[in-house]
Image (spheres, helix red, strand yellow):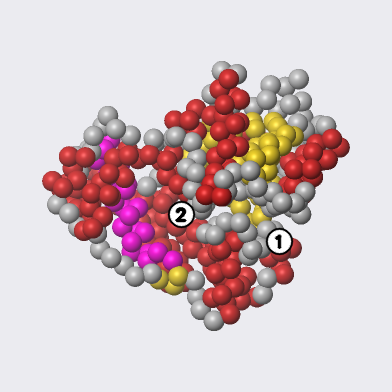
Amino acid sequence: MTHRRLTVAIPARDEAAYVVRALEALARQVGFDGRPLGGGLFDVVVFANNCRDDTANAVRRFASHSPQMATYVIESDLPPHAAHVGMARRAVLDWSARRFSDEGRNDGILASTDADTVVAPDWVAWTLREMVGVDAVAGFVDIDVFERQRLMAPVRLLYARERAYRRALAELEAVLDPQPEDPLPRHASFVGASFAVTTRAYLAGGGLPPLAALEDLAFCAALRRIDARVRHSMHVRATTSARRQTHVHDGFGAFIATLHERADHLQSVTVVHAERSIGQITARAALRRLWRGARDAGDIASVSAILGAPAQAWQPLLARNVPFGRVYERIIDRVAGRRAVYPSQSVEEATIALCNACASAKAAMPMRTTAASGAG
């Protein structure tokens, strides 16, 4: 039997209508040769919390009829203040991490998805491949094609424009602050519906924060804080539902509801102002170079201008014995009140501005290389 390398953790609350479809997709996993993955390479754990429907029994019935994939269900009634997706996802990931740790295998991979999400047939295969040389992989999640077709045209248009904005942001990050483990093509999201992390990195980051919403983004921030290597893979793909009624108040369902509301009022989606995003990425890249030991007066001036604070306010925090992610967070917190304040911006305007900034940065790259060569 093949040694188990990965455990898929799924939080589920009243998901009897969706969870079997999610499990069927996992049971159909194939390798790059198209042959079924089996032999204990991975297993699945569903954490059925506070369910008032048939979720747990649906998982058990599936497990009994699909012995080729080890599937477990944990039932729990969390107290009211903790009965949310963050606590549920943390509970199932913690359980999976302890199992790997008890086996002395901190290289074991913890993967996360949702009960209303269908992973691609090669999701596990690509996850295992993309995890080589990194600590975590963020998969790309899109709306199920059939559910997307059922959305009103104005909603589909807003969704497409928001996706274009995310692509522009991802490309700008890769150009201005490139990381060897996260090259283009890549995306810019980290969502609970599709990510994977080594047990070692999961524990080092303190586990998934038990937040009522946006726990996935908080976990990504925790990984950044310890300089974990994160790859935003376009190969690890999954689709999710476009439903508006979910148990998560600020999750993907809330985003879909916002698209409907905006479309009903003939309004665009608003996002972070492009100038703020550009400044944030530029400052992070410059601070990273300075943290690594570069002595660049241009970087110092640039960071001071973007943060609106003199160098003496933030340079003392550039400690080499502290992970860069933590250093960056401390600097941003220290000068947060001094940074320029930008209003929100329409997604269309922000996308154009990000694309223009990316084009300008690419155009300037040969000039920088030439100047550096001449100076050397």
**Looking at the image, is 326 positioned above or below residue 266?**
above
Residue 23 shows in the view: no
In front of the other: 232 or 42: 42
Could you tell me the amino acid type at mark 2? Glu
Could you tell me the amino acid type at mark 1? Val
Image location of residue 48, percent across then percent down: 68, 43
Image location of residue 96, percent across then percent down: 61, 31
Local packing at callout 1 (Cα closer than 10 Å; few below 14, some 14-19, many 20+) is few
The residue depicted at 38 percent of the width and 39 percent of the height is 225
- Helix, strand or loop at disc 2? helix
Which label sits on residue 171? Answer: 2
The residue depicted at 61 percent of the width and 25 percent of the height is 99
In the rendered image, the quadrant that contains the N terminus is: top right
337 relative to 92 in the view: left or right: left
The residue identified by callout 1 is 145
Local packing at callout 2 (Cα closer than 10 Å; few below 14, some 14-19, many 20+) is many
Image location of residue 27, percent across then percent down: 77, 39
- Helix, strand or loop at disc 1? helix
Any magenta on residue 291?
Answer: yes
Q: Which badge, 1 or 2, comes first in the chain's sequence?
A: 1
In the rendered image, the quadrant that contains the C terminus is: top left
Which label sits on residue 352? Answer: none
Q: Which residues are magenta?
A: 271-292
Q: Whole-Å distance between the Cαs marked 1 and 2?
A: 25 Å
**Looking at the image, is 149 positioned above or below residue 321?**
below
The answer to whether the residue labelled 1 contacts the one labelled 2, judged by CB atoms less than 8 Å apart, is no
**Looking at the image, is 343 positioned above or below residue 284?**
below
**Looking at the image, is 265 positioned above or below residue 322?**
below
Any magenta on residue 265?
Answer: no
